[in-house]
Image: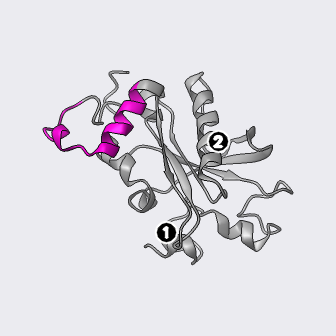
């Protein structure tokens, strides 16, 4: 752990006087970050929409952005994808906006895109609890379809286009759909 003031604004580094009030999930996050360097929150698909998963602790432990992936049919596949990218960060790889990575999503290409801060409360509440407040960076891990197209590209099929949000867009500019229903 570093002494950098950005990375130490979390429940691990500073007791804000409320640590005893932490719930089981907060304590599990802290334990996983201490043991593994990060934690993955998995939100399964339900009647409200597709599932998603995101990391907590990569910024704290490795100085890397947090990662989020949406819309794969299995939360465990999303967990594995985030862990694969997390291991790259732990080994010193720099993860940043605009990068493409191969070999982390069942042979599909993934692209990293900066998430707009205005989406954080909608999707990353547990990370906000951990870090106490933004700004921490979240990169959306967008996955391509079988033809190598990303969901923002016009030839992508409608189902693929709707399977993932476009978190780099401000919420008011995002296409209306399942991802904007909670706003």
Q: Is residue 139 left or right of residue 146?
A: left
Residue drawn where x is 37% and y is 31% of the image: 31
The tally of labels here is: 2
Residue tagged 1: 171
What residue range appears in magenta? 14-34
Query: Can the viewer see residue 134 in this picture?
Result: no
Q: Report whether 150 appears left or right of 114.
A: right
Horizontal and vertical percent for residue 123? 45, 58
Q: Is residue 175 left or right of residue 134?
A: right
* Residue plotted at (76% across, 54% down): 144
Q: In the rendered view, tell whether residue 138 sits above or below residue 163.
A: above
Mark earlier in primary sequence (1, 2): 2
Q: Which residue is mark 2?
A: 81
Does the magenta-highlighted stretch encompass residue 25? yes
Residue 6 on image: x %, y %: 34, 34
Circle 1/circle 2 CB separation < 8 Å: no
Q: Is residue 15 left or right of residue 166?
A: left
Q: Where is residue 24 shown, x and y percent of the image? A: 30, 43
**Helix, strand, or loop for circle 1?**
helix
Label 1: few (<14), some (14–19) or many (≥20) C-alpha neighbours in 10 Å: some
Quadrant of the rendered structure where residue 178 is?
bottom right
Disc 2 on helix, strand or loop? Answer: helix
Q: Which of labels 1 and 2 is toward the front?
A: 2
Label drawn at residue 153 = none
């Amino acid at each position: 752990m570093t002494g950098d003031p950005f990375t130490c604004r979390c429940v691990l580094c500073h007791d804000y006087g409320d640590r005893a009030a932490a719930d089981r999930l907060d304590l599990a996050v802290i334990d996983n970050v201490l043991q593994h360097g990060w934690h993955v929150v998995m939100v399964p698909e339900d009647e409200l929409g597709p599932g998603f998963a995101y990391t907590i602790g990569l910024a704290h432990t490795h100085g890397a952005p947090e990662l989020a992936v949406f819309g794969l049919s299995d939360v465990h596949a999303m967990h594995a994808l985030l862990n694969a990218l997390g291991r790259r960060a732990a080994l010193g790889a720099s993860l940043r906006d605009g990068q493409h990575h191969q070999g982390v999503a069942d042979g599909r290409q993934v692209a990293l895109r900066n998430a707009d801060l205005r989406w954080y409360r909608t999707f990353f509440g547990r990370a906000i609890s951990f870090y106490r407040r933004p700004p921490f960076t979240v990169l959306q891990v967008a996955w391509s379809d079988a033809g190598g197209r990303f969901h923002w590209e016009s030839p992508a099929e409608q189902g693929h286009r709707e399977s993932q949000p476009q978190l780099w867009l401000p919420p008011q500019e995002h296409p209306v759909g399942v991802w904007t229903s909670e706003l």
